[in-house]
Amino acid sequence: MSNAYTILLVEDEANIAGFMTAILTANHYGVRRARDGAEAMMMVSSYCPDAVILDLGLPDVDGMDLIRKIREWSQIPIIVVSARTHERDKVSALDLGADDYITKPFGTSELLARVRTALRHARAGSIPNGAGQSGSFCAGRLRVDYDKRHVYLEEEDIHLTQNEYRIVALLAQYAGRVLTYDFLIKNIWGPNAAGDNQILRVNMANIRRKLEKNPAAPEYIFTEMGVGYRMIEGD
Ligand code: CA
């Protein structure tokens, strides 16, 4: 049985590749494996997989260069899996166009959630600034109404400012995926906005005060320390 999605796994270490292949095939994904960057490039173009899971430490190229190369001609979802835990590596990978980032070691459910999210966004197509978005996003008690441009908690309007709404709507649009500070700032305040996170932090503090029962332990919008924010996956 297959769910018709094929994942290209780019990983040089056999035991990690074996572990991930077992998880993915048990969940009905088709899996192909590339052991280095050259093989990965060939397989992305010839087999048209639905998503790529990419290890950054490859024998022939740096995974970062591979992201850059693939993005020159393909919007295929790329999920980076790496032992590198530096915030700047995560930010670079995401800013180069990776869709998500998982740090080793990781759990089965985390891997599957990231793959699901990446495939869902690929199907929905990306709408960089939310223009023309309609309908609503729901997660637990939270509802974002894109037509009315309001956010509700159990049908109670929580009265966000314009920018607060735009931040929440953007995170909801990419629910399950981490959005970098830079991506959020450029989308909300424009491409020339200062790369200073302060204004975003202030807005997020206000959003959490209105949205979260306990702003210090959020249920809806999570902080990826040093990287950005992630909205919980929708219902
Ligand atoms: Ca490796």
Image (spheres, helix red, strand yellow):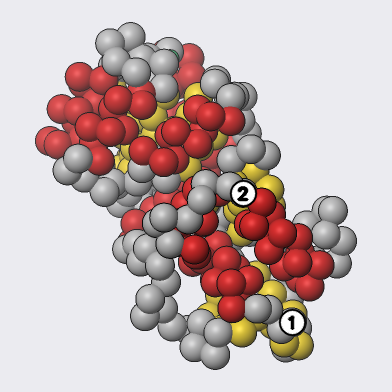
Q: Is residue 168 above or below residue 88?
A: below
Q: In front here: 52 or 20?
A: 52
Q: CA distance from mark 1 to mark 2?
A: 24 Å
Task: Name the residue carrying label 1.
Answer: 158
- x then y, percent, for residue 225: 67, 39
- Viewer can see residue 235: no
- x then y, percent, for residue 21: 43, 29
Sequence-earlier tag: 1 or 2: 1
Q: Is residue 109 left or right of residue 39?
A: right
Residue at the spot 32% in from the left edge and 63% down from the top edge = 125
Q: Is residue 141 left or right of residue 214?
A: left
Q: In front here: 220 or 202?
A: 202
Please tell me how many numbered marks the rendered image carries.
Answer: 2
Q: Are marks 1 and 2 in contact (CB under 8 Å)?
A: no
Q: Nearer the viewer, mark 1 or mark 2?
A: 2
Q: Quadrant of ligand 1?
A: top left
Q: Is residue 136 above or below residue 192?
A: below
Residue at the spot 48% in from the left edge and 14% down from the top edge = 15
Q: Which mark is residue 197?
A: 2
Quadrant of image for the C terminus: bottom right
- Amino acid type at circle 2 is Asn
- Amino acid type at circle 1 is Ile
The answer as to whether callout 2 falls within 8 Å of ligand 1 is: no
